[in-house]
Amino acid sequence: MTNGEARGLRARARGAGLRALGASGLPRLAAPFTRGAGAILMFHHVRPAAPSAFAPNRGLEITPEFLDETIRALREGGFDIISLDEAPDRIRHPAARPFAVLTFDDGYRDNLIHALPVLERRGAPFTIFVATGFAEGTARLWWIELEAAIRALSSVSFEGVELPCDTEARKTAAFLRIYWRLRAGSEERLLAEICALADRAGVDPRALTRDLCMDWDEIGALAANPLCTIGVHTLTHPRLAKLEAAAAQHEIEESQAIIETKLGRVARHLAYPVGDPTSAGPREFAMAAKLGFETAVTTRKGMIFPDHAGLMTALPRLSVNGDFQQRAFIDLLLTGAPFLLWNRGRRIAA
Ligand SMILES: [Zn+2]
């Protein structure tokens, strides 16, 4: 079995496990103990569904209707939706009601077009983590380039092997194989290999970035909205842990300075690009703390507990996954019970 197939199986097993867990009714009973002080929700694209069997990045997008449903689930579940600026106080001094923070990574234009109307209608504060290179149209959305290249090609050559891409299932298999092989390696290799594939497929990386990401005028307009907080997401969106320390620090510091200059306000929150343990670890957590960030968020899964007050630059999030756009899943995740299982009983898993 390939890496990709194994991951697919694990994802399906996780879905089935969640359904069984939800049906048991136990999570609702356990919620007062497993929910903690609250949750920081993570979103990426918000846009109408575009049905396609080859959609390997589908986990990173939800519909505007499901964003609305998620906000309803939070409010009906007793969560206070607060800004990220208010979160440190609620972590240090939990209230009777849990809190929720809505965060959107990367700075996609669809956030402005499709998410903002929902957030405004619901009066829900939110944070957009902006990678400045995306706003400038220079940094690369390599996971979307890879998808676009494989969509366009009928076969791809990778590591000396010819991978057929003549059906949607084969395209998905090729994507998963290449994606996880490159994720295991260096940032340079990942960017170079995908650049070569994009080139062969006639995919223009910069055009993709300009099409999908907000420019500074759009970010400025969004930042003027009282519901909006703009956070830092580096210059070029690298996996920071793969870089030399000085380069990693430059990515964080310089992007913070650019945002503060462009928008005329302080940016005190950071999201680590990719954010898994191979992309951000103890070195980055210490770096963010030393640079004075009030919070920094990963993509580790979990609720927020009072003990996170000592780990304010290593906060986990609750990923709202496009593969699971069902109210029952959100209700279940918001009990916190699934995270306790996934983290093997540990409430704090940095
Ligand atoms: Zn990102």
Image (cartoon, grey):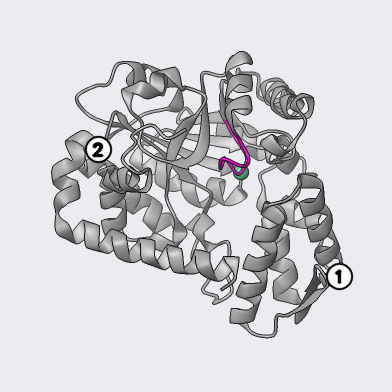
Q: Is residue 293 left or right of residue 43?
A: right
Q: Identify the residue at image location x=72%, y=24%.
A: 249
Rendered residue at 59%/74% (across/down): 54
- Counting from the top left corner in percent of width and height, residue 163 is at 74, 78
Query: Is residue 147 shown above or below 343?
Result: below
Start-end of magenta stretch:
271-280
Confirm if mark 1 falls within 8 A of ligand 1: no
Q: Taken as a whole, is the magenta stretch helix, strand or loop?
A: loop
Q: Is residue 231 visible?
A: yes
Report the mark closest to the observer, 1 or 2: 2
Q: Quadrant of ligand 1?
A: top right
Instruction: Name the one closer to the observer, 253 or 51.
Output: 253
Mark 1 vs 2, N-terminal side:
2
- Left/right of residue 162 with respect to residue 269 in the rendered view: right
Q: Amino acid at mark 2?
A: Thr
The amino acid pointed to by label 1 is Arg
Which quadrant would the N terminus be assigned to in this image? bottom right
Q: Which mark is residue 149?
A: none
Quickly name the residue at label 2: 34
Q: Could you say which quadrant of the image residue 198 lies in?
A: bottom right
